[in-house]
Amino acid sequence: MDLIYKTLFEIKLMHEYFLTREDGTNLFGEPDPRKRLDLLDQLFAMEEAGMDTDISFDFPETLRSTMRNYGLKVVPSYGGCRVLIRVNRIVLADQVGGL
């Protein structure tokens, strides 16, 4: 049986240091949150260095075994990290795969 993980939540660290362009503009000049996320996607598409090059994301050492037992994993993303949780695949009565 394959292991399946779903995103439980995502942490986005929006810091001006990482998000300032060469011309001095940054995401914080855009008032619309959706447009800010679109600009973040554009930076990712241009292969700009992500925050995980300077910041490490992980559970504290004292909690790692507990989090592993709960099926939780930390995965770096472009703007921060995601916490994933292991789920079981369930086939419903109408044969539609659910999670």
Image: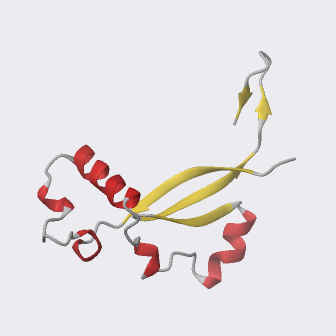
The x, y position of residue 12, in whole percent, is: 38, 62
The x, y position of residue 80, in whole percent, is: 43, 66
Q: Is residue 8 above or below residue 17?
A: above
In the visual, does 27 lie left or right of 59?
left
Count how many numbered circles sit on residues in the image. Answer: 0
Image quarter hosting the C terminus:
top right
Name the residue at 63% across, 77% down.
63
In the visual, does 20 lie left or right of 76?
left
Name the residue at 29% across, 66% down.
14
The x, y position of residue 39, in whole percent, is: 27, 53
The extreme top residue here reads 94
In the visual, does 86 lie left or right of 55?
right
Tell me the quarter of the picture where residue 85 sits.
bottom right
In the visual, does 31 lie left or right of 3?
left
Front-lying residue, 45 or 7: 45
The extreme right residue here reads 1
Tell me the quarter of the picture where residue 43 sits.
bottom left
Front-lying residue, 44 or 90: 44
Identify the colour scheme used. secondary structure
Front-lying residue, 41 or 58: 41
The x, y position of residue 36, in whole percent, is: 24, 52
Q: Is residue 40 above or below residue 54?
A: above
Name the residue at 46% across, 57% down.
10
